[in-house]
Amino acid sequence: MQKQGTITRWDATRAFGFIRSPDTTADVFFHVRDYRGAGAPREGLAVVYEEIHVGGKGPRAMAVQPVARAAAPEQSRPATAPPTRRASAAAKPPADRAQGLRRPRRPSSSSSSEPPAAAGAALIHLLMLGWAALLAWGVYGGRLPLWVLGAAAGVNLLTVLVYAIDKNAAQAGQRRTRESHLHLLSLAGGWPGAWFAQQWLRHKSRKQPFRAVYWATVGLHCAAVAAGAGGWRV
């Protein structure tokens, strides 16, 4: 299936990159041998490509070529000249021209997507501050052992490392880390590191089923920390 998108990342050293398309939820991987352009690929270049899925490794682009080159054969075909703006306007009946003048402009959809993203970032930052404050309060009050602080830092560093390894495996087509293992790291307290890895590496940040389970692990872990720091007993 042919789609159109924009090259968002190109690694000239390793000869591969990624294409972002509004028709695909995840970034599409492509290799230099699948590129049909005259020059080297570059970030920001609009391209068309054939999307395939092989072995559950995510989408991959084949026959990638710049939009201008893909449209060139069609432009070379002889065709009648399009009517000028004045001629087309004169051909419309007066009622149609008046209706066109009164037609309201549709609001842009790009601006409406920014507030939810900003609200999600603000929420996660508030949760991180509250989580750190609960841990410090529990240790200060003697309700949590001191080693909990070191364990929290260690599990977050481990989570970022596991996300990075899984991202490299996805790009190289190698064996992936199970999503259940990533969720267990979040549930164990590595959810702040998981969030930063998702944003920094652009990995698992747009897959909605994964995101839903991730937020569930955040809620469960924060509830457990609140219970422990407050000295609650079940």
Image: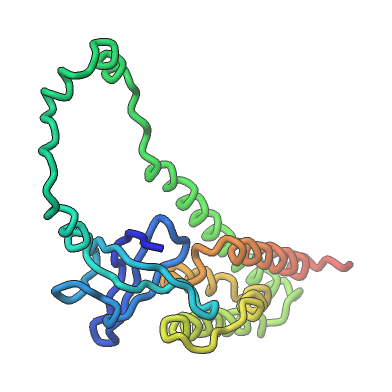
Q: Nearer the viewer, residue 54 or 76?
A: 76
Query: Considering the image in quadrants, where does the C terminus appear?
Result: bottom right
Dividing the picture into quadrants, the one containing residue 132 is bottom right
Q: Nearer the viewer, residue 179 or 115?
A: 179
Residue at position x 25%, y 87% in the image: 13
Residue at position x 60%, y 66% in the image: 210
Counting the numbered discs, the total is 0
In this view, 205 is above or below 39: above
Dividing the picture into quadrants, the one containing residue 81 is top left
Q: Nearer the viewer, residue 78 or 66?
A: 78
Could you tell me residue 34's position as x and y percent? 30, 78
Dividing the picture into quadrants, the one containing residue 155 is bottom right
Residue at position x 13%, y 27% in the image: 85
Could you tell me residue 230's position as x and y percent? 77, 65
Q: Is the image coloured rainbow, by chain, by secondary structure, or in one colour?
A: rainbow
Residue at position x 31%, y 67% in the image: 8
In-image side of 89 versus 95 (left or right): left
Could you tell me residue 228's position as x and y percent? 76, 70
Q: Nearer the viewer, residue 32 or 158?
A: 32
